[in-house]
Amino acid sequence: MRPRLHRAALVLGSALALACGAPAAGAEEWDGLPGGAGRDEVYGICGACHSLMIVKQQGLSRDAWEETLDWMVEEQGMPELDRDTLDLVIDYLAEHYGVDKAGAARP
Ligand code: HEC
């Protein structure tokens, strides 16, 4: 029913306003995704279906990320991304959540 939905939206709105009330900080903005080209896309596209935690906990090579996203499209119903967006997303993931980031201490 519309009025109820509307109220829920208002409540959510004020919760968000509260959460964002304190400026700066920023640590948990974007669910903790580091800044950089591709962050908007990863946040918007991947966060639409599941927690970004599931993304952040991976440490995959570029190829493995590409395979994961193919799988996301073929089996999980992710809308196929155009080549440019896909490259942007994969570059971002490989840079921030690549094999080196999973614990190995390579420079
Ligand atoms: C249409 C919904 C949808 C979108 C959009 C989506 N995913 Fe997923 N993703 C899923 C589902 C559903 C699962 C859980 C599959 C399972 O565990 O059976 C999943 C699981 C995963 C996993 C865990 C894989 C594993 O080995 O357990 C990763 C990593 C992942 N997604 C990354 C991404 C990334 C990165 C994006 C954005 C580019 C993305 N997903 C976008 C639906 C989606």
Image (cartoon, helix red, strand yellow):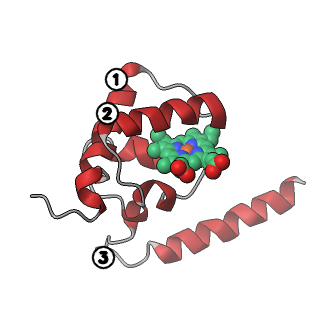
Given the image, on which type of amino acid does mark 2 rest? Leu
Left/right placement of residue 14 relative to residue 5 reads: left
Task: Identify the residue position indicated by label 2 in the image.
Answer: 88
| Front position in the image: 78 or 23 | 78
Say which quadrant the C terminus sits in.
Answer: bottom left
Which element type, helix, strand or loop, lies under badge 2?
helix
Q: Residues within 10 Å of mark 3 (few under 14, many from 20)?
A: few
* Outermost residue, top side: 83
Residue 72 x/y as whole percent: 56, 36
Which element type, helix, strand or loop, lies under badge 3?
loop
Q: CA distance from mark 3 to mark 2?
A: 27 Å
Task: Identify the residue position indicated by label 3 in the image.
Answer: 25
State which quadrant residue 10 falls in.
bottom right
Is ligand 1 closer than 8 angstroms to the Cβ of mark 2? Answer: no
Q: Is residue 53 above or below residue 73?
A: below
State which quadrant residue 28 falls in.
bottom left
Q: CA distance from mark 3 to mark 1?
A: 32 Å
Left/right placement of residue 46 relative to residue 96 reads: right
Marking on residue 84: 1
